[in-house]
Amino acid sequence: MKNIHLLLGIQSLLAIFVSINRLTDWFSGYVLPNEFLRWLDFNNMLVIPLASLVATYLLKKVIEYNSPAREGRAHIAWNLVFIVGLYLTAASYGDHEVTNYLHVRFCLDDPSSDLCRIVIFNDDEFSHWVFFTGFTMVNAAILFLQNLFPYLGKLSGTDVTLLFVNSLFLGAGVFANIGFEEIGLDLYVVALLAIISALLLWRRGRQPMFIYYTAAYWLGLIGSLTAQALR
């Protein structure tokens, strides 16, 4: 559990960094003199997702342990889902951050040109479809690997509290991203993962990742729906 709390804590710190990166002017400068990207875009494309996905991979390795399920068909299948999800997530960041930068810098005043229409489509639609497909696959794989490799110890009150505290950061990230924008694919993805995690928690009991994801996604979902209703 110490390693699980550590890796979820890293994700929470990254969530704080995401907010600082997006909501302040600290990273508005350009990476190189040719102005190919701002530090904001560079961090969003390489630094933050790379650190997050490494932490997620290490979390997956902590969850897995030697058992009859290891290297069985279900284990291999969910590993493939995880790997494909990682690739799609990485591809979406590469597509989104560059086109978002070009969109904001060159296409806000004249979005009708052929070049800007392509840039805007990649920024606002295609990269989002790829991201949410990858996001769903990675997080579903973690949930079902936890189901395949249940934690054999007993969760203490401190463990549950730490899982809940870390879930607040993920829930806040969900709320910040979908609570104040037009409802799109993201809301349905969060709702799907919230339902899956809650069903697994109900059927299999208090497993670390079931508690973490159920708390995070339901808090984010309820908060976002409330914010949408009050708009």
Image (tube, rainbow, N blue to C red):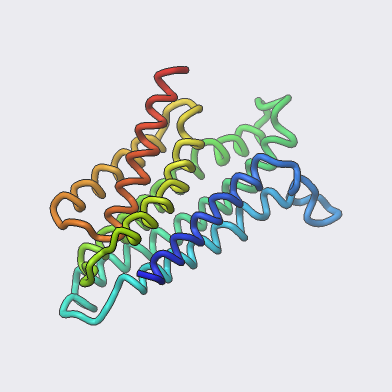
Tag count in the figure?
0
Furthest toward the right, the residue is 33
Q: Position of residue 197 (x, y in %)?
A: 26, 49
On screen, residue 74 above or below 162: below
Furthest toward the bottom, the residue is 66
On screen, residue 108 above or below 83: above
Q: Is residue 65 left or right of residue 29?
A: left
Residue ID at (44%, 25%): 227
Q: Position of residue 26 (x, y in %)?
A: 75, 47
Q: Is residue 170 left or right of residue 94?
A: left
Residue ID at (42%, 43%): 171
Q: Is residue 11 or residue 60 the one in the foreground?
A: 11
Q: Is residue 188 left or right of residue 199?
A: right
Residue ID at (21%, 72%): 152
Q: Position of residue 64 (x, y in %)?
A: 29, 74
Furthest toward the front, the residue is 157
Q: Is residue 224 left or right of residue 49?
A: left
Q: Position of residue 138 (x, y in %)?
A: 37, 58
Picture quarter with the N terminus: bottom left
